[in-house]
Image: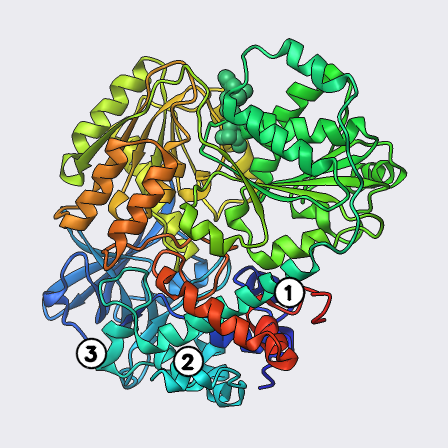
């Protein structure tokens, strides 16, 4: 295997598969080596059916006794296995006819999956399985890695791909030999140890931030290298910052005053300050590079509108980008409400759009007839050209990494556009310094008055029935509610399954409510349709995965239940909770946890109850996480780092910066590190 070759050069990887892999940050063979397991499974021994325990994952074998198609709200396939007088049911929500037939009575099956206890006995939902014909194959000799997966990408495929790349790890150039003097393993050793630990080391190899074992030397080695690569990219970028000229944008037209006149409220002091800072930047020919941080609901949109109007009044165009179609459409709607009355049209560029419509808009942008374009990544594709782009606004920055940020800046040929990046994920000041060394910052640390704070309760999942009763009463009074299911990073099928089966159980318990679900396995159009129906009030209870985390705005939704809250990062919980408390009604958030709750976990969730200040919550998270016990800040897709975790590895930041300063004069090493960790898609002036 050639480590620099694109994945499409591998057998069995077509363009479609390659696109899905790219969503995990996997484009070249060497990327596979940097795609580390989330955890490991033990398939080195078989567990007899009689000894299966709910809540644990196990490898087991049995003989098919019977199969059945059951019809709940959805069709599902139930396969009953028997062995030594004990039984377990396999449950499949997604299945084909051939699959169904393969489970003929008498057939022997070997499965791996998480066991659930139901009143009627044990079951296993969507196990990995193989039908055994002939003598049973040998058991695994080593632990089995579980990788972050994505839509349409199975664990099996990832294991095969990484397994094929691993023998080549030796050939990956170790450009940081100085780390060995510090007692850290070589790059190849670190990679091998993390992908295929010997059984006794598996605990130590666990990668989940704060999983209680501290950080292995192998992980430290990789995290340092990655942080160093990012620092290098920032240093080069900071060096290149004064280059290029931006248009000097000066307010002075009538648009903003007209908008202010119709504003139904007065701006907060923080909004006024941020707008003044941005205006001062825009007026200069040095390209603005500013991060606007502000908690959910702090009024970032209005600040963005002020910036946009400054550009438009000066005769320039504005591009406004959000990370998902859903959010981009919501922004388009909100912006239109401010801008329509001013006679400013808005071009919408999404991923799914009729070609003819798209072409007309593209022509309008290229001809300079359209002042404002709103959309997703689609905005920054090569086919999109602006006549005179003056300002790019990017929302929800935490979904993007340094590399994406830089790629955006290169858009367009003429003057360099100013850039305003907005994030609702508060970042403690200490951390922001090193994470965003290349950005100036404005902070909205004040909320508009008149909000009723969200009342937050901590409730054990053993009291789930009471919570369901509470939903019944609330929805009966016209409230809309969210039920958030936990993130399952290793499999979108299991995550979708959790949402589907939760919706089903809630439907059984609350038959009079209109219940729908949204998850990542649904088609984009279907997902949008459900969200729109929820927004229109046609759904009482929305069962969702964390896809609703960012930005979704439905004022009438004032109750939120979050399942397995103890497994989520505080910032993520804060984001989720920010979805309620947007209307006039008093809102409530129930954090359901699975007992027993450890001391640290309790302290973290208590912090959620105590405060709704995002900056405070972020500080608490940093302070008490240490050897915490939760999964943490990992977000699906688009995460900024592959290996490093900003909370877990913050102690490495200084060392990484020092390392980067040493490496920087060495062009070859710098280039290798940036290419390896930030991808070849990015062009860095002096590196490229
Ligand atoms: P976020 O920072 O989460 O993006 P938004 O910009 O969506 O927040 O603002 C949330 C809501 O608050 C919007 O309905 C907006 O119109 C309103 N809002 C913004 N600024 C103020 C203010 N100064 N006073 C009252 N309401 C405001
Ligand atoms: Mg917003």
Please tell me in which quadrant of the rendered image residue 460 appears. Answer: top left
Q: What residue lies at 24% left-to-right and 32% top-to-bottom? A: 610
* In this rendering, position of residue 317 left or right of residue 540: right
Single out the mark in the foreground, 1 or 2: 1
Please tell me in which quadrant of the rendered image residue 6 appears. Answer: bottom right
Q: Position of residue 418 (x, y in %)?
A: 71, 43
Q: In which quadrant will I find the N terminus?
A: bottom right
* In this rendering, position of residue 601 left or right of residue 39: left
Residue matched to label 2: 191
In this picture the colour scheme is: rainbow
Crowdedness near tag 2: few (<14), some (14–19) or many (≥20) residues, C-alpha within 10 Å: many
Q: What label sits on residue 45 in the rendered view?
A: 3
Of pointers 3 and 1, the one earlier in the residue sequence: 3
Crowdedness near tag 3: few (<14), some (14–19) or many (≥20) residues, C-alpha within 10 Å: few
Q: What label sits on residue 236 in the rendered view?
A: 1
What is the secondary structure assignment of the residue under circle 2? helix
Crowdedness near tag 1: few (<14), some (14–19) or many (≥20) residues, C-alpha within 10 Å: some
Q: Measure how far apart labels 1 and 2 are at the Cα level.
A: 27 Å
Q: In which quadrant will I find the C terminus?
A: bottom right
Q: Is residue 584 visible?
A: yes
Q: What residue lies at 42% left-to-right and 82% top-to-bottom? A: 179
């Amino acid at each position: 295997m050639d480590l620099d070759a694109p994945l499409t050069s591998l057998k069995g990887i077509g363009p479609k598969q390659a696109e899905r892999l790219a969503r995990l940050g996997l484009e070249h063979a060497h990327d596979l080596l940097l795609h580390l397991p989330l955890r490991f499974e033990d398939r080195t021994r078989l567990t007899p059916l009689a000894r299966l325990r709910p809540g644990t994952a196990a490898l087991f074998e049995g003989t098919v006794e019977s199969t059945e198609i059951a019809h709940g709200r959805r069709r599902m396939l139930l396969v009953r296995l028997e062995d030594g007088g004990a039984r377990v049911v396999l449950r499949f929500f997604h299945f084909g006819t051939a699959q169904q037939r393969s489970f003929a009575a008498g057939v022997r099956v070997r499965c791996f999956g998480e066991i659930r206890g139901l009143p009627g006995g044990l079951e296993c939902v969507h196990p990995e399985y193989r039908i055994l014909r002939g003598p049973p194959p040998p058991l695994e000799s080593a632990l089995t890695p579980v990788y972050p997966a994505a839509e349409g990408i199975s664990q099996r495929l990832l294991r095969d791909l990484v397994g094929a790349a691993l023998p080549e790890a030796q050939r990956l150039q170790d450009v940081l030999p100085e780390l060995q003097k510090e007692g850290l393993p070589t790059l190849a050793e670190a990679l091998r140890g993390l992908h295929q630990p010997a059984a006794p080391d598996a605990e130590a190899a666990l990668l989940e931030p704060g999983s209680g074992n501290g950080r292995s030397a192998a992980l430290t080695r990789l995290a340092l290298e990655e942080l160093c690569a990012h620092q290098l990219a920032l240093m080069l970028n900071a060096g290149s910052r004064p280059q290029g000229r931006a248009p000097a944008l000066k307010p002075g037209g009538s648009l903003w005053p007209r908008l202010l006149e119709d504003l139904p409220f007065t701006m907060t002091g923080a909004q006024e300050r941020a707008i003044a800072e941005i205006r001062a930047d825009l007026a200069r020919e040095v390209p603005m590079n500013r991060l606007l941080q502000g908690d959910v609901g702090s009024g970032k949109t209005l600040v963005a509108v002020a910036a946009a109007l400054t550009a438009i009044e000066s005769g320039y165009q504005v591009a406004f980008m959000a990370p998902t179609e859903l959010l981009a459409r919501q922004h388009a709607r909100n912006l239109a409400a401010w801008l329509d009355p001013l006679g400013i049209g808005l071009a919408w560029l999404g991923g799914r759009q009729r070609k003819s419509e798209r072409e007309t808009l593209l022509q309008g942008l290229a001809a300079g007839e359209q002042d404002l374009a709103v959309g997703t990544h689609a905005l920054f594709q090569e086919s999109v050209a602006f006549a005179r782009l003056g300002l790019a606004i990017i929302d929800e920055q935490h979904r993007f990494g340094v590399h994406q940020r830089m790629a955006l800046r290169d858009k367009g040929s003429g003057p360099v556009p100013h850039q305003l990046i907005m994030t609702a994920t508060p970042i403690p000041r200490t951390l922001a310094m090193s994470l965003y060394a290349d950005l100036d910052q404005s902070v909205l640390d004040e909320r508009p008055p008149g909000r009723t704070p969200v009342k937050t309760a901590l409730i054990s999942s053993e009291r789930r029935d009471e919570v369901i009763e509470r939903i019944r009463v609330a929805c009966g009074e016209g409230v809309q509610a969210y039920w958030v299911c936990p993130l399952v990073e290793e499999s979108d099928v299991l995550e979708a399954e959790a949402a589907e089966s939760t919706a089903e159980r809630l439907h059984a318990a609350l038959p009079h409510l209109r219940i729908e679900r949204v998850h990542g396995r649904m088609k984009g159009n279907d997902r949008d349709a459900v969200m729109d129906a929820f927004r229109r009030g046609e759904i009482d209870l929305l069962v969702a995965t964390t896809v609703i985390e960012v930005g979704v705005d439905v004022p009438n939704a004032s109750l939120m239940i979050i399942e397995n809250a103890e497994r989520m990062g505080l910032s993520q919980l804060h984001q989720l909770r920010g979805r309620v408390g947007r209307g006039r009604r008093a809102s409530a958030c129930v954090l359901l946890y699975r007992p027993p709750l450890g001391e640290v976990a309790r302290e973290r969730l208590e912090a959620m109850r105590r405060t709704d200040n995002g900056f405070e919550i972020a500080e608490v998270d940093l302070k008490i996480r240490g050897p915490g016990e939760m999964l943490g800040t990992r977000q699906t897709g688009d995460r900024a780092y592959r290996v490093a975790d900003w909370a877990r590895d913050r102690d490495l930041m200084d060392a990484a910066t020092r390392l980067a300063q040493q490496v920087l004069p060495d062009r070859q090493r710098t280039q290798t590190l940036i290419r390896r960790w930030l991808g070849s898609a990015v062009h860095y002036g002096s590196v490229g």
